[in-house]
Amino acid sequence: MHPHPTFSVPSTASDWWRDAVFYQIYIRSFADGNGDGVGDLAGIRSRLPYLAELGVDALWITPFYPSPMADHGYDVADPRDVEPVFGDLAEFDALLAEAHERGLRVTVDLVPNHSSHQHAWFQEALAAEPGSPARARYLFRDGRGPDGSEPPNNWPSVFGGPAWTRVSDGQWYLHIFAPEQPDLNFADPEVVADLEKTMRFWLDRGVDGFRIDVAHGMAKPDGLPDMVPMEDTGLLDDHGPGDLRFDQDGVHEVHRRIRAVIDEYPGRMAVGEVWVSDDKRLARYLREDELQLAFNFKLLTAEWTTDDLRDAVTHSLDAVAGTSAPACWVLSNHDRPRHVTRYGGGELGTRRAKAAALLQLALPGAAYLYNGDELGMPDVLLPDEALQDPVWERSGHTERGRDACRVPMPWSGTEASYGFSSHRETWLPMPDGWAPLTAEAQAADPASIQSLYRRALALRASSPAFSGTSLAWLPAPEGCLAFRRPGGLVCLLNLSGHAVPLPEGSVLLASADVGDGSLPDDTAVWLQA
Ligand code: NOJ
């Protein structure tokens, strides 16, 4: 049935996720199987050989559930079905089976904090009376002021504007994100029971785990009091304990319920999108009966300086130190500028991104790659009229939003849509000049970032140098970072502005030529010492 008979055997360890490399597929932008300019499940299936050869262990597929797409799938109208734009359940089952045959695990997004306004429950709530059980599944409240025309509290939405929208009978409902994403009420047992039902639905089909959206949301403080006024809510940032929308103690009860379901299915896992920067508060999500992994976003927010990068590593390791969880490293995702661009763009950005790849993949724990990281994809400056992120409209066209990091992946050929789709037009336009960036062009170039990723992933999977879960910092020249793993891997990263001598040991891999015995600026090397 499959053209390539040499499948790698998936690890049978039940804690396979501890050092796995996950590949995030932003479904709209990965591969289009049906020629409508939007990525889909069939497109993913057609690219499984590429992913297996690249050497990742597992996939995270962003939401593909029925959705009016107010937030491109993070507004879920039915969490137990497939959006027709992306395929159907049979296509999902086929993708899952084939991924498993190829040794790739598959995890999917779980979006508990909110539903779409088109979800049957929300439609029912709108039609129901204030105070009814249908409204109790969400957070409906009366407004303030003599005629209730002021929102119930001063919370801002993450996407700009107030976090409340008024309905025709005068009540307001809470939406931490877009108005099309009403927050669910986790104090209502039916809401928790429905989440468990959704989890079992996908676990029974065979998924290997979940990425939990806004995993620090869900619980809201009693009485929904005002919070410290916050003009700029900063997209998915952590504002600390004053931000009453997130990281409330009650959220841990929800995580315990989630974990109880996961534990019914040996070998399955959950990673949380927890935007909590305090190490101790983050660690609370990783207690024995809560999440197995939480994204460490500190690498994603670090500047390209030794201080920032060292801090990011140290804090991420400190956060998990008192828990049984490994760290979980992220350089880019679909919500933030891509790291090639953050690091300066162009050749410089790519050079640094290559070095960053060796840093990320040398660290102990799990790692998440975002589709296109392996091609060194940069952000794209899109024309105003192409922008689709709700942030653009809700900010009154002052924030461009996240579309720049969501442009479809270039696979082959010399012009748009570069093998992404059989259609020239894609849901976000692809720029001219991407021929050298395509997966096909890079596969043929041993010096490409894609070739570096392939070699790095192969080494990480096979070399005993990567064994052990700890990291020891080593003395390093000024402007450099160096650390050692118990198995003997040494990683040296040079940001000093000039070349430095290579340390002792045999070179396993370097992000640029080290043939003259020195490590150039903005370069990393792996050595076996
Ligand atoms: C986090 C997701 O990564 C982001 O894309 C989405 O907009 C919000 N959660 C709301 O679901």
Image (cartoon, grey):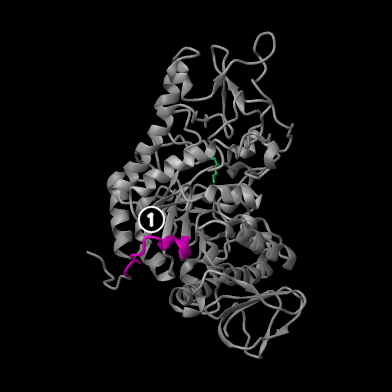
Q: Is 188 in the magenta? A: no
Mark 1 residue CB less than 8 A from any atom of ligand 1: no
* Camera-nearest residue between 87 and 20: 20
* Camera-nearest residue between 419 and 407: 407
Image location (x, y in percent) of residue 279: 64, 52
Ligand 1, by image quadrant, is top right
Q: Is 18 in the magenta? A: yes
Q: Which residue is mark 1?
A: 106
At a point 28% along the width and 53% down the height, the residue shown is 94
Question: Quick one: which residue is furthest to the top in this view?
Answer: 146
Q: Is residue 110 above or below residue 496?
A: above
Tell me, yes or no, if residue 3 can be seen here: yes
At a point 41% along the width and 47% down the height, the residue shown is 36
Tell me where the magenta segment starts and ends, as one range: 9-22
Q: Amino acid at mark 1?
A: Val
Q: Is residue 41 left or right of residue 522?
A: left
Q: Is residue 200 above or below residue 433?
A: above
Q: Is residue 267 left or right of residue 409?
A: left
Q: Is residue 353 above or below residue 70?
A: below
* Camera-nearest residue between 347 and 249: 249
Q: Is residue 479 left or right of residue 181?
A: right
At a point 33% along the width and 60% down the height, the residue shown is 99
Question: Quick one: which residue is furthest to the left in this view?
Answer: 1
Image location (x, y in percent) of residue 324: 50, 58
Question: Quick one: which residue is furthest to the bottom in this view?
Answer: 516
